[in-house]
Image (cartoon, rainbow, N blue to C red):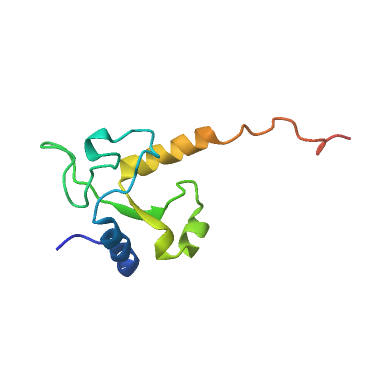
Amino acid sequence: MRSQPIVGAAVFTAVMDAAGYRCQCSGECGQPHTKGDGRCQHEHDHYTSKHGRRVRLMAAPADPLATDVAAARLPVSELRAWCPDCHGAAARHAKRQLPPTPTDQCGLFDL
């Protein structure tokens, strides 16, 4: 039996079944995942390598920058299986792609 979270197990199981209990990152993290034919090879409850750590996949939005509130409202069909490494890297990569924030205050504090 595979491990699953205590809360939200039905959602988690539905996402993992659709993903085949394998990370669904296809390069959003910045890695080409060439060994996995373009998809991350990490599988839930398997190890990263012979002496590596155990992988615990998570069900998270396809958009790694989605807020927690927005993510909680998404239907199962809009969630994906992510390994922690890919999800974190995809969020960092997506943040770098955002346009720079303006530095001027647009007269907000001008008197």
How many labels sit on residues? Answer: 0
Which is more toward the observer, 21 or 51?
21
Q: Please state the horizontal and vertical placement of residue 85, each as a whole percent of the image.
A: 32, 40
Inspect this view and state whether residue 23 appears. Answer: yes
* Extreme-bottom residue of the structure: 10
Q: In which quarter of the image is residue 104?
A: top right
Residue found at x 28% / y 64%: 13
| Residue beneath the point at 45% across and 36% down | 92
Question: On screen, 57 above or below 1?
Answer: above
Q: Among all residues in the image, which is located at the extreme front?
A: 37
Q: Position of residue 33 (x, y in %)?
A: 29, 36
Could you tell me which residue is drawn at 34 percent across and 41 percent down?
86
Residue at image location 22% in from the left, 35% down from the top: 35
Which quarter shows the C terminus?
top right
- Looking at the image, residue 87 lies above or below residue 60: above
105 vs 89, left or right, is right
Q: On screen, 30 above or below 58?
A: above
> Can I make out residue 7 in this image?
no
In this view of the protein, which residue sits in the foreground, 91 or 39?
A: 39
Residue 78 found in image quarter? bottom left
Quarter of the image with the N terminus is bottom left
Q: Please identify the quarter of the rendering in which residue 41 is found.
A: top left
Q: Position of residue 79 (x, y in %)?
A: 40, 57
Whole-percent x and y of residue 90? 41, 40
Residue found at the far left of this picture: 50
